[in-house]
Image (tube, rainbow, N blue to C red):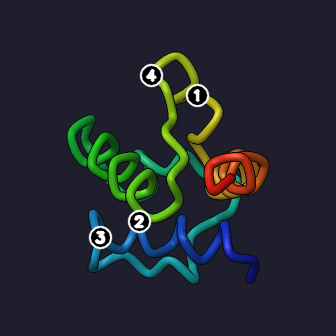
Amino acid sequence: MNDAEAEVRKALSSVAPEADLDALPRDADLQEELDLDSMDFLNFLIALAELTGVHVPESEYAQVRTLDACVAYIAARMGAATE
């Protein structure tokens, strides 16, 4: 597991502590699969920003809907966020 995935999983755990993230399909919609409402999803993105320094603008929410997509999005931006 890379750093981006570890941080995404940590942020997901903060909003869905009861979720079995190991069983989460990598291509499933996070909100549907984890039963996250819009506030939960926003709190996930806030936690993710706090952990990684990467802020996801509302216009790009669709790019972080699945575990794989979210990890790729964060990984591509983590270096730039810490520079």
Q: The residue tagged with tag 2: helix, strand or loop?
A: helix
Q: Which residue is mark 4?
A: 58
Q: For marks 2 and 3, give the CA distance.
A: 5 Å
Residue corresponding to mark 3: 14
Sequence-wise first label, 2 or 1: 2
Amino acid beneath label 3: Ser
In front here: 72 or 76?
A: 76
Q: Is residue 53 left or right of residue 79?
A: left
Q: Which mark is residue 30?
A: none
Tell me which corner region of the image, top left, top right, bottom left or bottom right, holds residue 79. Answer: bottom right
- Amino acid type at image mark 4: Glu
Identify residue for label 2: 12
> Looking at numbered disc 2 in the image, what kind of residue is underneath it?
Leu
Q: Nearer the viewer, residue 69 or 55?
A: 55
Q: Which residue is mark 1?
A: 62
Disc 1 marks a residue whose amino acid type is Ala
Q: Are marks 1 and 3 in contact (CB under 8 Å)?
A: no
Relative placement, left or right, of 48 versus 71 is: left
Quarter holding the N terminus? bottom right
Determine whether label 2 and label 3 are within 8 Å by CB.
yes
